[in-house]
Amino acid sequence: MTWLNRNIPLDRVFTEDTSRSIVWELNFLVHPKMQLLMFDDISMFVKNVSGSRAIRLIALMALTLPGFGGRLLLCQAISAPPTQAQTTVRVAMRDSRLPEVQQRLDVDRDPVPSPDSESIPNVSETLPLAPGAPDEIQKSQDGSYTMHKDVDEVLLTCAVVDEKGQPIQDLSRGDFRVWEDGVKQATTSFLHQDQPVSLGILVDNSGSMRDKRVAVNAAALDLLKASNSQDAAFIVNFSDRAILDQAFTSDIAALNRGLSHFDSRGTTALYDAVAASADELVNHAKLPKQVLLVITDGADNASRLDLEQAIRRVQNLGGPVVYTIGLLFGIDKEESDRARDALEKLSQETGGIAYFPHSLEDVDTIATEVARDIRGQYTIGYHSSNPVSLGGYRVVHVEANAPKHGRMIVRTRRGYFAQKPAAASHQTQAASNAKQ
């Protein structure tokens, strides 16, 4: 759109020079009669006075007239201020015929404002929360949730199911036992409620996904609709590079547009996309509970990172839970086995689940199950008996035992890298350095 052809009456277009000329024109029209009257009066008066007095009076009048005229001119200028010059505005418009320029997720950049940034402002811009109990989650004025904990407290997100895989939702804090490196730990916080989550949805955009994207997009959209309405999600489409097609938002329509931005071609850089998305969670998520969902139809064949490096990156950044959906039907057995092993390990190490549907018709059911699993998780916190200053990797194991239930299976991350105090106080900087 352009405003260059906007019709404006010529008599409404003024500049500063034009206004000044009008003022002088008005001054000329008003002054002749006044000047003529004053000249006649002076002439008659001079005839009746002596020569020396006449000279003095004429000089006085000569000095007075310019001042009087100047005051009149000033009054006119004040009573009729000049109209400000009309400004022509040019508005740039993107050519809709050209392909949309996407942003790379693996390159440092300023954060892209969310479409609902007015409804979810940056946490740093809100008033600080009053100190809460260690096991208390408080909701701030901007709608975000914060769990109060000490900086050396370890938080574990746990899902509990029975032997048939059905979720168990009625456990209490005393039903859980936590071990770190084989040493039992005392829990310091516990929470079981439907918390909003910061969710990243990563969809394979390689050439082999071309015929699957419609069904995958529909399933991902159903997952979003079944999630907590206060969840904030972002969309990443990846092939040989990861593209952030929609930044954090709760707007389902905007997320749907992000899912529709696909052009299936190229190779699969799955591990790089996971690492970059974990960085996105650390740097821009406003909710403490964090999840990644990865949907792919094959093994990684283009990443700079390997599987172990990708898992370590996730664990170093606080460990979001990673769910994976492998659409491995219709590919050769060697690639299918390699992809299955990688997706299972990625999910197991972070506390998520790897799903392998037999057809596209099963994807929607799995997406709904993922949404239910996320909403039913427990959050358990403890202080490690190992000094934080030692750093290093810690193996974690959690069990649940309740008389009214039989054997229960607890899913949580298998371990974490302890952050030394200096690194923990500069977590954001560490996340930035991890990209290099």
Image: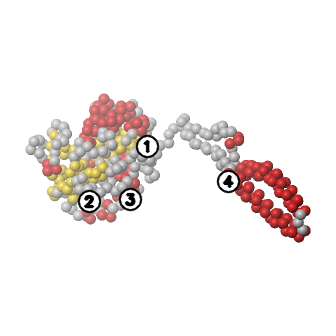
Q: Nearer the viewer, mark 1 or mark 4?
A: 4
Q: Earlier in the sequence, mark 1 or mark 3?
A: 1
Question: Considering depth in this image, is 4 or 386 the residue closer to the camera?
Answer: 4
Amino acid at the residue labelled 1: Pro
- As helix, strand or loop, the secondary structure at mark 3 comes to helix
The residue lying at 18 percent from left, 37 percent from top is: 166
Q: What residue type is labelled 2?
A: Asp
The disc, 2 or 1, on the residue closer to the chain's N-terminal end is 1
Residue at screen point 22% across, 53% down: 135
**Rendered location of residue 319, percent (x, y):** 29, 51
Q: Residue furthest left?
A: 403
| Crowdedness near tag 1: few (<14), some (14–19) or many (≥20) residues, C-alpha within 10 Å | some
- Look at label 3 and name its amino acid: Gln
Question: Which label was assigned to residue 78?
Answer: 4
In the drawing, does residue 409 fall left or right of residue 428?
left
Q: Earlier in the sequence, mark 1 or mark 4?
A: 4
Give 239 or 105, whichever is nearer the viewer.
Answer: 105
Determine crowd level at label 2: few under 14, some 14-19, many 20+ residues with C-alpha closer than 10 A. few
Q: How far apart are marks 3 and 4 (CA)?
A: 59 Å
